[in-house]
Image (cartoon, rainbow, N blue to C red):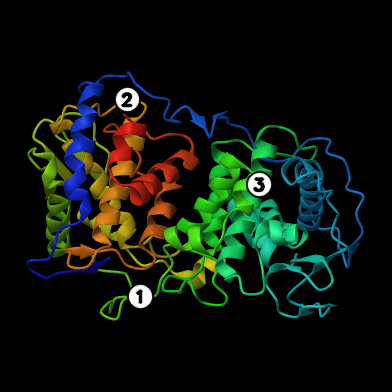
C-alpha cells in the first residue's frame, strides 16, 4: 500500500453502502448463531462438495498414446503427456457440446525439452534457455520445459500445477480452433487471450473435479488450493501494465478467469473480450508517487494510518469502531488468533506488530522463482489480516454472527470492499499495484486470517476464500450480506 492524503476529498463509495450492507447482517443473529439464510458456498465449491484427498495421477491411469518429440520419460514428462491426453479428451467432449457441434482436432505436435541444454526449434523459435511452456500457432504445437519449469512447479505446488500450465497453454490452441467464436484476432490484447486461456483451464479442472477424467483426480479443497497457488506463482510482476504486450495478468485477475471457467464453463470463456476484461482488470503500473513500489514498513505510524483508513471506510455502519492495540496478538478472554485477534469483550483488535511485520516483508520474486521461500508476503497481506479482525468488530456492532460457517467468507468480502475503497485517490492509505496479489497469496495459505471467523476457523476451500474477497472488491459491500448473510 502507499500513503494517501488530501483534505476535502470525497470519501469512497464503501461509506455510503456499508450502512445498508453491514446493518443487513443483523438478521443473522448474534455471536454463536449457526444459521444461514442463503446457500453461500461455504459448504461447496461452485456447487461441488468440498473434498479432501491426494490430487494427481489416478492409480492405474492408462499410458497416453501420444508422440512427444524429444521426450525423456521423466516424471514431469509423464505428467505433461497425461495432461495433454486428458485435456484433449475433455475438448473432444466439450467442443461440439458448447460450440454448435464443431468437432475438435488434436494439436499436430508435442515437444519436451530441457531449457538448460536443448536447442530444438519450433516455428516460434528455439527453445534454448526458454524456461516456459507454450503453444505455437504456426505449427500447431505445444511445448514444455521439463528441465526447469515443470520440476520447480511440481516440487512447490504438487503434480496438478504441471497440469495447470499445460491446460492453460492448450487453451490457446482452443482459441485458434474457435476463431471468430472466441473473438480473438491479431489486434486482441495479449492479456485478454491469457484470461481466456486461464478460463478454459478452469473449465477443464471442473471436469476433473467431477471425476470424469481417466488420468487425474483433484480435490476441491487442497487440490484446487494448490492449482490456484501455482497461478499466483506465474503471475505478472507487480507494476506491469495491463496494456503491456506481454501481460498475462495479476494473480487476482488470473484466478478470476480460472474460477469463471470452473463455475460457468467454456462458453463463458469464449465470451471474454477486451471490453469486459478491461472493466475488471486490476493490472496497472505503479503510481508515480509510489516510492516504495507498493511496500510500506509496518510500524506504529502505519498501524495508526490503517486504523484511520478502516474508520473512514466503515463510518457509515454507525457502530463503535474497534481499537487496534499492540498486545501480542492475543485476547485476555476468549479465543486468540495471533498475530491478530478480535477481542469481543472489549472491542479491540490485538496485534503482534513484530510478527505482522514479518508477513509484511516484500516478496522476493527472484528467490520465489527459484523455489526458495524468503521474505514475507507483502505489506497488504499483513494489513488485510488486521482489517479482517477489525471487520469482525463492525459485524459484532450490528449484531451479526462471528462464528457461523459464513462469518469468515463475509469477513473476507468486507476486506475486499475496504480494499476497493482504498483504491480511490485521496484516501489515508491507497491500494498499490500488487497489493491484491498479496491478499490472494495470504488467502491460499492454510493459516490465513483474512477469511477466518472470530475463532480462526476458515473455509477449507481456497476457491471460496478467494472468491469472497473478489466479490467484495468488484461488487461492493452489499454483496457481503446478501451472499454471506
Residue 102: mark: none
Judge by depth and name the residue closer to the eye, 102 or 194.
102
Residue 268 position within the rendered picture, expressed as x and y whole percent measured from the top left? 59, 47
Looking at the image, tell me whether mark 2 or mark 3 is earlier in sequence order.
3
The residue sitting at 55% across, 46% down in the picture is: 260
- Cα distance in 3D space between marks 1 and 2: 39 Å
C-beta proximity under 8 Å, tags 1 and 2: no
Residue 438 position within the rendered picture, expressed as x and y whole percent measured from the top left? 39, 58
Judge by depth and name the residue closer to the eye, 209 or 339.
209
Q: Residues within 10 Å of mark 3 (few under 14, many from 20)?
A: many
Q: Residues within 10 Å of mark 2 (few under 14, many from 20)?
A: many
Q: Is residue 27 rendered to the left or right of residue 348? A: right
Inspect this view and state whether residue 127 appears: yes
Residue 310 position within the rendered picture, expressed as x and y whole percent measured from the top left? 17, 51
- Quadrant containing the N terminus in the rendered view: bottom left
Residue 404: mark: 2
Nearer to us: label 1 or label 2: 1
At mark 3, the secondary structure is helix
Q: Residues within 10 Å of mark 1 (few under 14, many from 20)?
A: some
**Total marks drawn?**
3
Work out whether 186 lies above or below 457. below
Q: Which residue is mark 1?
A: 286
Nearer to us: label 2 or label 3: 3
Work out whether 21 lies above or below 256. above
- Cα distance in 3D space between marks 3 and 1: 33 Å
- Quadrant containing the C terminus in the rendered view: top left
Q: Is residue 333 rendered to the left or right of residue 376? A: left
C-beta proximity under 8 Å, tags 3 and 1: no
Looking at the image, tell me whether mark 3 or mark 1 is earlier in sequence order.
3
Q: Which residue is mark 3?
A: 266
Residue 472 position within the rendered picture, expressed as x and y whole percent measured from the top left? 34, 46
The residue sitting at 82% across, 66% down in the picture is: 141
Amino acid at each position: 500500500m502507499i500513503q494517501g492524503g488530501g483534505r476535502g476529498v470525497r470519501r469512497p463509495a464503501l461509506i455510503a453502502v456499508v450502512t445498508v450492507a453491514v446493518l443487513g447482517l443483523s438478521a443473522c443473529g448474534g455471536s454463536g448463531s449457526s444459521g444461514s439464510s442463503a446457500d453461500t458456498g461455504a459448504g461447496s465449491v461452485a456447487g461441488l462438495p468440498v473434498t479432501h484427498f491426494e490430487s494427481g495421477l489416478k492409480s492405474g491411469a492408462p499410458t497416453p498414446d501420444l508422440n512427444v518429440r524429444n521426450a525423456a520419460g521423466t516424471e514431469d514428462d509423464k505428467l505433461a503427456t497425461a495432461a495433454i491426453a486428458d485435456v484433449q479428451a475433455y475438448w473432444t467432449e466439450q467442443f461440439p457440446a458448447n460450440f454448435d457441434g464443431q468437432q475438435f482436432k488434436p494439436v499436430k505436435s508435442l515437444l519436451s525439452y530441457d531449457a538448460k541444454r536443448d536447442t530444438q526449434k519450433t516455428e516460434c523459435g528455439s527453445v534454448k534457455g526458454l524456461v516456459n511452456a507454450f503453444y505455437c500457432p504456426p505449427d500447431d504445437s505445444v511445448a514444455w520445459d521439463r528441465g526447469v519449469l515443470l520440476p520447480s512447479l511440481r516440487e512447490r505446488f504438487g503434480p496438478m500445477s504441471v497440469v495447470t500450465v499445460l491446460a492453460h497453454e492448450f487453451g490457446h490452441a482452443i482459441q485458434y480452433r474457435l476463431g471468430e467464436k472466441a473473438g480473438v484476432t491479431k489486434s486482441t490484447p495479449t492479456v485478454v487471450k491469457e484470461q481466456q486461456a486461464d478460463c478454459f483451464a478452469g473449465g477443464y479442472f471442473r471436469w476433473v473435479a467431477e471425476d470424469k477424467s481417466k488420468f487425474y483426480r483433484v480435490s476441491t479443497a487442497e487440490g484446487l488450493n494448490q492449482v490456484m497457488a501455482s497461478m499466483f506463482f506465474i503471475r505478472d510482476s507487480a507494476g506491469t501494465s495491463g496494456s503491456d504486450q506481454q501481460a498475462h495478468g495479476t494473480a487476482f485477475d488470473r484466478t478470476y478467469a480460472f474460477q469463471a471457467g470452473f463455475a460457468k464453463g467454456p462458453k463463458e470463456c469464449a465470451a471474454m473480450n477486451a471490453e469486459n476484461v478491461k472493466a475488471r482488470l486490476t493490472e496497472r503500473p505503479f503510481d508515480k508517487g509510489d516510492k516504495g513500489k507498493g511496500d510500506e514498513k509496518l510500524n506504529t505510524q502505519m498501524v495508526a494510518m490503517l486504523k484511520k483508513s478502516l474508520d473512514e471506510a466503515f463510518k457509515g455502519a454507525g457502530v463503535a469502531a474497534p481499537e487496534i492495540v499492540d498486545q501480542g496478538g492475543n485476547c485476555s478472554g476468549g479465543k486468540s488468533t495471533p498475530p491478530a485477534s478480535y477481542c469481543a469483550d472489549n472491542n479491540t483488535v490485538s496485534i503482534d506488530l513484530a510478527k505482522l511485520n514479518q508477513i509484511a516483508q516484500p516478496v522476493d520474486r527472484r528467490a520465489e522463482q527459484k523455489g526458495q521461500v524468503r521474505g514475507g508476503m507483502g505489506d497488504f497481506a499483513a494489513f488485510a489480516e488486521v482489517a479482517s479482525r477489525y471487520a469482525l468488530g463492525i459485524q459484532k456492532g450490528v449484531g451479526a454472527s462471528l462464528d457461523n460457517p459464513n462469518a469468515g467468507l463475509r469477513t473476507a468480502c468486507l476486506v475486499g470492499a475496504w480494499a476497493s475503497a482504498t483504491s480511490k485517490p485521496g484516501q489515508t492509505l491507497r491500494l498499490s499495484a500488487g497489493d491484491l496479489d498479496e491478499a490472494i497469496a495470504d488467502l491460499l495459505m492454510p493459516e490465513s486470517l483474512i477469511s477466518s471467523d472470530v475463532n480462526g476457523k476458515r473455509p477449507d476451500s481456497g476457491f471460496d476464500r478467494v472468491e469472497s474477497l473478489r466479490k467484495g472488491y468488484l461488487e461492493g459491500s452489499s454483496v457481503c450480506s446478501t451472499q454471506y448473510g
